[in-house]
Image: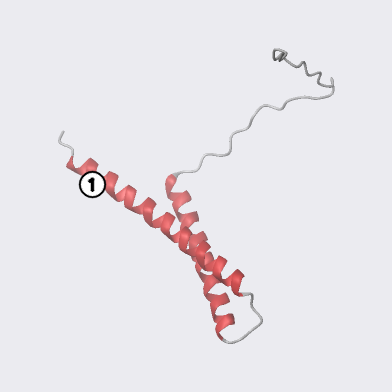
Amino acid sequence: MIDPVTAIAVQLPSSVEFAPATQPPATDFASWLAQQVDDVNTKVSQADMQVRQLAVGENTNLHQVMISLEKAHLSLELVVQVRNKVLEAYQNMMQMQV
């Protein structure tokens, strides 16, 4: 026969204190978008530099170059999709009748 499941009591040491959760500082959308664009630009520049190093025959790991290229591509896709959604929302608002 299977025994029923019972609750397990956990005894915490008295020295354990829980700190209240802190919220990260709020940032506005414009600064977030500017940060993302800068991040994408950095990733694309790094990927481009690695491709150039690979092309001239420097000792560069092909796998790392491909990973850098894919990271840059995905970051760019994210920023483009956010831009598309913002434009779509703006167009929807402009079509609303008051």
In the picture, which quadrant includes the C terminus?
Answer: top left
Kindly state the secondary structure of the residue where label 1 is placed.
helix
Residue toward you, 57 or 82: 57
Please state the horizontal and vertical placement of residue 8, each as a whole percent of the image.
75, 17
Number of residues whose C-alpha sits closer than 10 Å to that of mark 1, classed few (under 14), some (14–19) or many (20 or more): few
Residue 2, quarter of the rendered image: top right
Indicate whether 5 appears above or below 28. Answer: above
Given the current orientation, which residue lies at the most extreme left position?
Answer: 97
Q: Left or right: where does residue 82 sit relative to residue 10?
A: left
Residue at label 1?
Answer: 91
Residue at screen point 17% across, 42% down:
95
Residue at screen point 35% across, 53% down:
83
Residue toward you, 21 or 72: 72
Residue at screen point 58% across, 87% down:
56
Please state the horizontal and vertical placement of residue 45, each as a whole percent of the image.
52, 71
Please state the horizontal and vertical placement of residue 29, each as a whole percent of the image.
43, 46
Given the current orientation, which residue lies at the most extreme front position?
Answer: 1
Indicate whether 86 appears above or below 11. Answer: below
Q: Left or right: where does residue 42 sit relative to residue 10?
A: left
Please state the horizontal and vertical placement of residue 54, each as a whole percent of the image.
58, 81
In the picture, which quadrant includes the N terminus?
Answer: top right
Please name the amino acid that badge 1 sits on. Answer: Gln
Residue toward you, 81 or 24: 81
Indicate whether 40 appears above or below 81. Answer: below
Residue 53, quarter of the rendered image: bottom right
Residue at screen point 52% across, 62% down:
71
